[in-house]
Amino acid sequence: MIARQDAYLEKTDVWAKLSAPLPVGVISWRQDGKVTARDGKYFARFVAYIEANTVRERLDAVAPGEWDLTLELLAVIAGEDGDGAQYSFKARLQILGVIREDIGTGRDYKQASTDAFKRAAVRFGIANELYAYEQNWVEMDGDGKYAKPVEDPLLAYARRYGKLGVVSTNGATSDQNGVASPPTSLLTDLEIVSCPKCGGRMWDNRLTKRNPKAPDYKCQNRSCDGVIWPPKPVGDVKEEKKAATTSVLVGGGEEELPF
């Protein structure tokens, strides 16, 4: 009985270490989507991400020799709007006998396989904190193909959401170096923001949409049209039926986690 309890506590400690926040230095930012003109200036949305090597280092540090990755190549998806074909892999990550799976896509085999690996890893909590980051719109020096941000996206995020330990209105904080920590957000509830069609990550449009009747969430995968609509007023039978249908689509099971 004691041995079994010790084993349980040991595994619990492993899961806690896997999901511990990553050092800010390993978090990078990349442009997502096209440049948008606004009030005579140009802006682009940047999203936080980590490299696959960061995931490997966390796995090797917490569970050395106790994890295994298997990748399965899936059918190629035809691209849209001239984006080219999308390659897909299913990653099967096993840690201490526990298995998590997820699917990743990309423009080539390497991008798709690393995307799948990272998506499977987040099911164990690795880089889970990135879901709490708010949208980061950064000013660009133009709207051309080679446009560059006029400031570091990390500094832009820190300036907008909090710096030098000051807590902003949305709960973001920062350390003594002015680097922002992830703010408290409902996006940490991964099951709610899973795409109802593909189970992938979704854009949170609740604060930026102009039309209140537009979807609250939209799938980040361009080849998927999954959306989640805002809740409907209680009392309308038709709307209640629609809301019930949406909840069934979003639920997806206890293990429905995106990346």
Image (tube, rainbow, N blue to C red):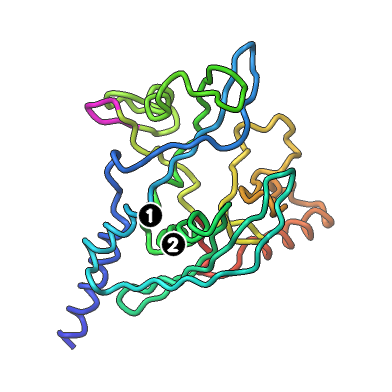
**Quarter occupied by the N terminus:** bottom left
Height in image: 157 above or below 11? above
Distance from Cα at disc 1 to Cα at disc 2: 7 Å
Q: Which residue is drawn at 59% across and 44% down?
A: 203
Q: Is residue 44 left or right of 237 when viewed as pictured?
A: left
Secondary structure at badge 1 equals helix
**Magenta span includes 175:** yes
Secondary structure at badge 2 equals helix
Q: Which of 144 and 9 is in front in this view?
A: 144
Q: Is residue 70 left or right of 34 when viewed as pictured?
A: left
Residue 87 lies in what quarter of the image?
Answer: bottom right
| Magenta-drawn segment | 173-178
Residue furthest to the right: 238
Q: Is disc 1 in contact with disc 2, using a CB cutoff of under 8 Å?
A: yes
Q: Which residue bears the numbered disc 1?
A: 52
Callout 1: few (<14), some (14-19), or many (20+) C-alpha neighbours within 10 Å?
Answer: some
Q: Earlier in the sequence, mark 1 or mark 2?
A: 1
